Amino acid sequence: MNQISFRKSAFLAVFLVVAFVAGWEGYWRSQNYELAFNDDESLWSYYRSQVYESSPARPVVIGSSRIKFDLDQNTWEQITGKKPIQLSLVGTSPRPLLTDLGNDPNFRGILLVDVTEPLFFTPDGAFPEKQATRRVKAYPNWSLSQQISFRMNRVLESNLLFLDEEGLSLPALISRLPIQDRPGVWPGPRFPLAWSLNRFDRQTAMTRAFLRDTVMQNQVKAVWNDVREHSPKQAVDGPLLEAILNSVKKSVDQIRTRGGQVVFIRTPSDGPMNIGENLGFPRSKYWDRLLSHTGCRGIYFSDYPELSRFRCPEWSHLTPRDAIPFTRSLIPILEQKTGWKIARHSATPPLVSSTL
Amino acid sequence: MVFNSYTFVVFFAIVLFLHYLPLAWRTKKINLLLASYLFYALWNPPFILLLWLSTVVDYQMARLIWQEQRPARRKMLLTVSLVLNLGMLSYFKYGGFLLENFTAILSAMGVTFQAARPDIILPVGISFYTFVTLSYTLDVYRKKFAPEPSFLNFALFVTYFPHLVAGPIVRPEDLIPQFKTPRQATARQIYQGLFLLSLGLFMKVTVADGLLADTADLIFGLPFPVRTLDAWIGVLAFSGQIFCDFAGYSTCAIGASLCLGITLPDNFRYPYAAVGFSDFWRRWHITLSTWLRDYLYIPLGGNRKGRPRTYVNLMLTMLLGGLWHGASWTFVVWGALHGLFLCIERLIRDGLDRTRRRRTAAHQEGALSEGTVISRAALGPALSLRGRSGQFLLALLTLFLVNITWVFFRATTFKGAGLLLLSMFGVIPNGAPMLTTTAILTVGLVTVGIIVCHWRMRNSSLERLMERLPWWALGMVWAILLISLVLAQKSTSSFIYFQF
C-alpha cells in the first residue's frame, strides 16, 4: 500500500468515526438523555483533596447513596455560602472513608457520616467495604497526569451526553444485552438506564424520566428486593459488630483528638425498605449503640417531623424536589445538635431545584 | 503518564509539533529528552532523580570501563555499576519481600523479630530502565562497542518516553545509532504509527480493560472455589487481558515512536500461536527473553557445558525471569513452571533428535538392505504432528499449559492459586457458579478471536497485512478500532506491566 492509500484509509477512518460520534450523540440527545458526570476515581479524588478546607459551613460528607440524593448541595450552598465536600460512594460502606480520614493527620475538619445500616455495618472484605477501600487506596496514587486528564475530561463530559461510562460505555451496553443468566448466578443489581445522574459536585439526583415513569420506579423497587434477596440474611452481630464499632470509634477519636468533629445522620427510607431495615437492624442495637459507643451526636430522620414527611418514590432516596426542604430543615437541626454556626445570616432559601 | 489518557493525547501532539519544526537535530533530541522526563515526572516527580542517577552513573562507568585496561579494575568498575543498578532495583522492588522472608526464616528458627513494615513505593518502570542501562554497561565491558560519547544520545536512549516505563527493553544498538543522524518519519510511517497507536489502545482500553478485566478480577479475587467453567473462563480472561494489556502497550510504544521516525524492536509476535515453550518465548516479551538469554543464560554457560548444566541454566534463567516480574513467590513459581516446561520440551526434542538420527542411520542401513522404517510420528492415521492440524493441536496444548502458569502469575497467594487450579480441574466439584452468561460469551468470543488471529498471523506480520488490505478495508478496520475506543470510553487505568 502506498502513501496515498494510507492517507485515504486515514481519512475514511476519521470520517466514519466523526459520523458515528455525531450520530451516537444525536441519538441520545433525541432520547432526552440527561447530561451527567462519571462518578469515577478522579472525580472522587478531586474532592478528597479538598477535605482540609472543611468547616461547619463546608463539612465533609461520607456515606452511601442516600446522602448523595438527599442532601441538596445547591440548597446547602445558598444557606451557608459553600457547598459540602461530598465523598459518599453509592452502594458502599463509608467505614473505609472514615478510617482514611481518621488516619490522615492533616484532617481536622467537620465530618457528616450518613448511615444506611445494611451498608454501614457490612463486614470487612464484603463487596460494599471493598469497593470503598479501593477508592480510598486509589487517591494517594492520583498522579499529575491523571489530574490533567481529569480537567480535560471535565470539558468533554460537560458537553457530550454519550460519555456516560455507567450507562453508555461498551461494557455497560454489553451487560444490558437480553441474555438469560445461568441458574444460580446473580449478575448484581441491574438498574434501568438513566434512572439517576451524577453531577460534577457529586450530587446524585433522579432523572426527569424516572420521576415521570412509575414503571421505572417499580423497576428500581424490584432491584432493591433483588439486592435484599442476595444479601446476608443475618446482620452482623456479636464480636464482629463489636469490632466494627471499635474501629469506628478509633477513627472518630483520631479525628476528635485533632480538633475535628463527627456527626452521624440517618437519612430517610420508605415503605418495605424502611420496614426491612428496622427489622434487620433494630435501632437500639445498631444506631443507638453506634452513638453511645462513639460518643457522637446523631440525627435520625424519624425523630424530626420536618425530616420525615417525605416519600421516596423507590423506597430509598428523596426526589430532587424533596431534597431541597430536607436540606433546609437539616441545617438548623445540625446547628441545634452541635452548636455549630452553619447558616449565613443573609441566606435566603432557594425556590427551585438545583440544576446541573 | 499512560498512553490511554487525554494527557498523553495533548502531550504527544505537542511532541510531534516540536519534532517537525525546522530545528536542529540536537535541539529536537533535547526536546525529546525533556518530553521524556516530563512523561515520567507526571506520574511521580521525585523518582526522576533515580532515573538521572542511573543514567549518569552508567554513562560514566561505561566510559571508565572502556578506558581502563587492567582486568581487575574493569571488573571492579562493572561491579560498582551492577551494585548500584541492582541495589536500587532490590531496594525498591524487593525490599519488602526480602524483609518479609527474613522475618519468616527467623520466626521458623524460633527468633521473634518484628520488623517495621517498609513503606516503599515502587518507581514505575524501574525494572525496565535498569535492564536497559545494564545491557549498555555490560556490552561496553564485553567490548561489544565503544561507549557512546554523547551524553545526550545516551540519556535519550535510557529515557526515550515510548519505551521508558514498560518496554520494549531496548538495546544500545537498537536506539543509539538512530539518534546519531536526523530522523523524521515519512508520511507513510506516520500513518502506520498512528494506526499502531490506535490498535494498541484498542487492545488495552477495549479488550483488556473493557471486555476482560472485570471477569479476571472477579474470579481471581474470590476466596472460595468456583465451577470448572467459571475457573477456566476467569483464567482465559486473564490470559487475554495480560496479552492485550502488555502487547497493547508495546504496540502503542512502537507506533508513537514510528511517528517520530524512530523504530523500536518488536516485543510480541502472536504468542498464543506458539508451538512449544521455546517458541512461546520467541514470541512473548521478546526483548525480555532475549535480554535474559544474552545477559544471563549464555553467561551462565547456556547449552555449552553439557546437558545437565543446560537444564540448570534454563531453570535459573526462568526463575530469575519470574522474580523480575514481581517480588513474590508466586512469580517465582510462574518462572519455575516455564523453566520446567522448557526443560521438558528440550528433553523431548533431544529424544526425538536422537530417535531421528537413529532412524536415519537405520534408514540408510535399511536402504542398503532394502528394509522398511517408519520415518514420521503421527497422532492418528491422518494427523501428523508436523502437519498444520498437528501443529495447531500442539499450539493449543502450549496455550493450555501457558494458562496454567498464568494462575500463579495473577493469583496473589498460593492458596488462591491452589483453589483456582483445583476448580479448573474439577477436583472441587461443587464450586459456586459466578459468571453471567454474557461474561462467559464475551470472554469465549475474545479468546477464540485472539487464537484465530494469532494462528493466522503467526508467520506473518501486521505490516504485511496492512500492505495486503485495500485502502477502504484498512480504513474500515481503523474506524472500527477507534469507534470501539470511543464506545469503551476513557480508561486511565495503568498497564499491568507498570508494576513490574
Image: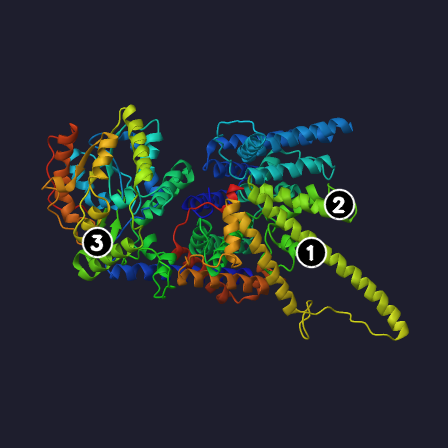
Q: Position of residue A295 (x, y in %)?
A: 23, 29
Query: Which quadrant of the figure has residue B57?
Result: top right
Relative to B179, say whether B490 is above or below. below
The amino acid marked with disc number 2 is Arg
The amino acid marked with disc number 3 is Thr
Q: Disc 1 versus disc 2: distance between alpha carbons?
A: 16 Å
Question: Disc 2 is attached to a residue of which chain?
Answer: B
Q: Are marks 3 and 2 on the same chain?
A: no
Rendered residue at 31%/27% (across/down):
A254
Q: Is B290 placed left or right of B222 in the picture?
A: right
The crowding category of the residue bearing disc 1, from other C-alpha atoms within 10 Å (few below 14, some 14 to 19, many at least 20), is: some
Indicate the colouring scheme: rainbow
Rendered residue at 16%/52% (across/down):
A271
Residue B174 is at least partly visible in this image: no
Q: Which residue is mark 1?
A: B345
Q: Are marks 3 and 1 in contact (CB under 8 Å)?
A: no
Q: Are marks 3 and 1 on the same chain?
A: no
Residue A350 is at least partly visible in this image: yes
Q: Are marks 1 and 2 in contact (CB under 8 Å)?
A: no
Q: Secondary structure at mark 3?
A: loop
Q: Which residue is mark 2?
A: B309
Q: Secondary structure at mark 2?
A: helix
